[in-house]
Amino acid sequence: MYDPLAIVLAAIATLTVVLFSALKGTGWEPTPDISEEIKERRAAAVPETEFPEPGNRAIGGGGGGGAIPAGGDGEGGELAEGSEEAAGPGDIPEDEIEHFEIEFLKQGETIEVANNETILDAGEENGWDLPYACRQGQCVSCAGHITDGPSEDYVEHDNQQMLEEAELDDGYTLTCVAYPRGSFSIETGEAP
Ligand code: FES
């Protein structure tokens, strides 16, 4: 028949397996997420160094010395790039600003306008209610007529997209994007 010892051993083995399975099922816990903790620790460590941010990345790489000037260059480069992108007829250095006499015929007044200011802005600053809509050279609401000749002899347009060559030659201008390059007379509210 059956050996009682074998039965007892089999029972113990079975219990052990069941017990382990039970423990496995209930005792396991996920590894706690310590990524936030690590990030915080790293963040806390940064101010303790004397390197600026680009230098920190170079710590241990031997590039700390180069990283600082590189950061400086980067800033300069970005600025230069930014100013290049933004460069337009109105971006004139302080020491190159000139003023021209612009006669607003309908208003019966002559005012001085800086070469970094649009005709429209200058007129508005003088208190006149001049027509405009987009202020970006993309409509003709602000058009005016320079009576002295081709408008581009007297103003520089910043990306005007509406007037054709012949209209510019006839003296028409979009005052919202027109920067003076000489003195002239203009009739505002005149579209071709
Ligand atoms: S307001 Fe639209 S082009 Fe001047």
Image (cartoon, grey):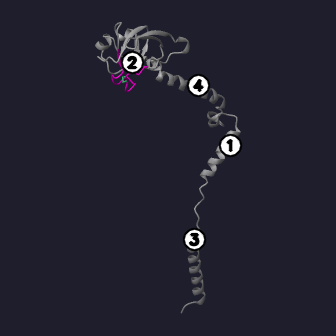
Closer to the camera in the image, 123 or 177: 123
C-alpha gap between disc 3 and disc 4: 58 Å
**The disc label shown at residue 175, or none:** 2
Q: Secondary structure at mark 2?
A: helix
Within 8 Å of ligand 1, the CB of disc 3?
no
Q: Earlier in the sequence, mark 4 or mark 1?
A: 1
Q: Which element is circle 1 on? A: helix
Residue 131 shown in magenta = yes
Q: Which residues fall within the magenta stretch?
A: 128-144
Residue name at image x 57 percent, y 83 percent:
10
Name the disc covering residue 73, or none: 4
Q: How much space separates mark 2 and mark 1, taking CA atoms?
A: 56 Å
Mark 3 or 4 closer to N-term? 3
Q: Is residue 10 visible?
A: yes
Where in the figure is residue 31, as x and y percent of width and height? 59, 59
* Pair 3/4: label in front: 4
User: Where residue 59 sits: x, y (%)?
Assistant: 66, 36
To which residue does mark 1 refer? 45
